[in-house]
Amino acid sequence: MEEYDELSAGPNENGAIDLSHSAWAELPDQLFEFSSRLLVLDLSHNKLVEVEADFGKLNLLSTLKLNNNLITSIHPNIGMCIRLKTLNLSGNRIGEIPKQIGKCTLLEEFRCSDNFLETLPPTFGNIVALRVLELTNNKLTSLPPEIAKIPTIQEIHCDGNPGLSMVPDDMRASSDMVIWALKLHRDHQAKVEIKVAHYNELEEETREHEETRLRLKDECSTIETEVTTLEEARPTGYINMKVKMKQMAARVKCTVS
């Protein structure tokens, strides 16, 4: 088959392999043997159902196109592709992006439109080179506010996500407005975290004070018991008798004199 011939030849002079539009449902092990030379891999318009663990071997990849397949899952090893600059996953059946994507800090374009995403991991905020985030036509209900701290972010496309209440409908057409909304959520989240931390400190102090109060109460109870015991054991009768005897002896002495 022509696609096997293309694969057997390995990467071209630009380090690229194009296996698009070839009806691949599974990838041969041979593909991952080119890890030392493969820079661009186009697997778009095939029948792949997963981004398998072996993709982690392709740690020199700068461009990976997996759009228009049947992909439902992405292995965490995608985070090992630390030189990725472009990742296209649009037109699949993906419901979740692994948090390890945050290790791909050189990623500039992430395209994942027409999938089933409900949110993204907060580790997206670690992708400090990200410029384009394409998320149209998913099932997003939230976006991580951490995205707003990315200094290079320029475009965020999130139309076609009716459940995304944190970004109003009339703001989604403007990347600047989406970024502004995320900054508001980020600032609010930061304030909440400060309040929660303060509350936790107060709660810890209260717990320590309560423990001290209970300890002192127990110590007081113990001391009261000891005092009662000592009072009961005090030789009051003997002392009174001794005093009387001394008094009687003194009277006898006076009479004799």
Image (spheres, rainbow, N blue to C red):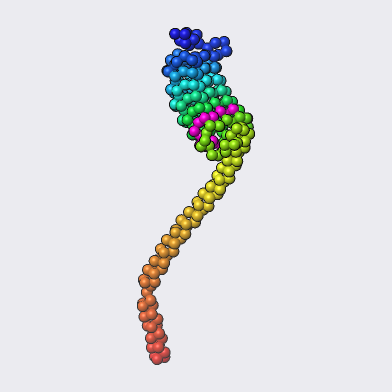
Q: Position of residue 83 (x, y in %)?
A: 56, 22
Residue 135 lies in the magenta stretch: yes
- Please give left or right for residue 135 compared with residue 214 in the image: right
Instruction: Give whichever of 163, 241 is nearer the camera.
Output: 163
Instruction: Give whichever of 92, 151 is nearer the camera.
Output: 92
Q: Is residue 36 in view?
A: no
Instruction: Give whichever of 182, 23 is nearer the camera.
Output: 23
Quadrant for the C terminus in the image:
bottom left
Instruction: Give whichever of 257, 215 is nearer the camera.
Output: 215
Q: Position of residue 6 (x, y in %)?
A: 49, 10
Q: Is residue 32 above or below residue 219?
A: above
Q: Position of residue 71 (x, y in %)?
A: 45, 24
- Please give left or right for residue 222 compared with residue 120 in the image: left
Q: Is residue 201 above or below residue 151?
A: below
Magenta segment: 132-145
Location of residue 62 by image quarter: top right
Q: Is residue 27 above or below residue 193?
A: above
Q: Position of residue 132 (x, y in %)?
A: 59, 27
Residue at horizontal 46 percent and vertical 60 percent from the top = 216
Q: Is residue 177 in view?
A: yes
Residue 249 lies in the magenta stretch: no
Residue at horizontal 50 percent and vertical 27 percent from the top = 114
Residue at horizontal 54 percent and vertical 26 percent from the top = 111
Residue at horizontal 53 percent and vertical 52 percent from the top = 202
Q: Main secondary structure of the magenta part?
A: loop
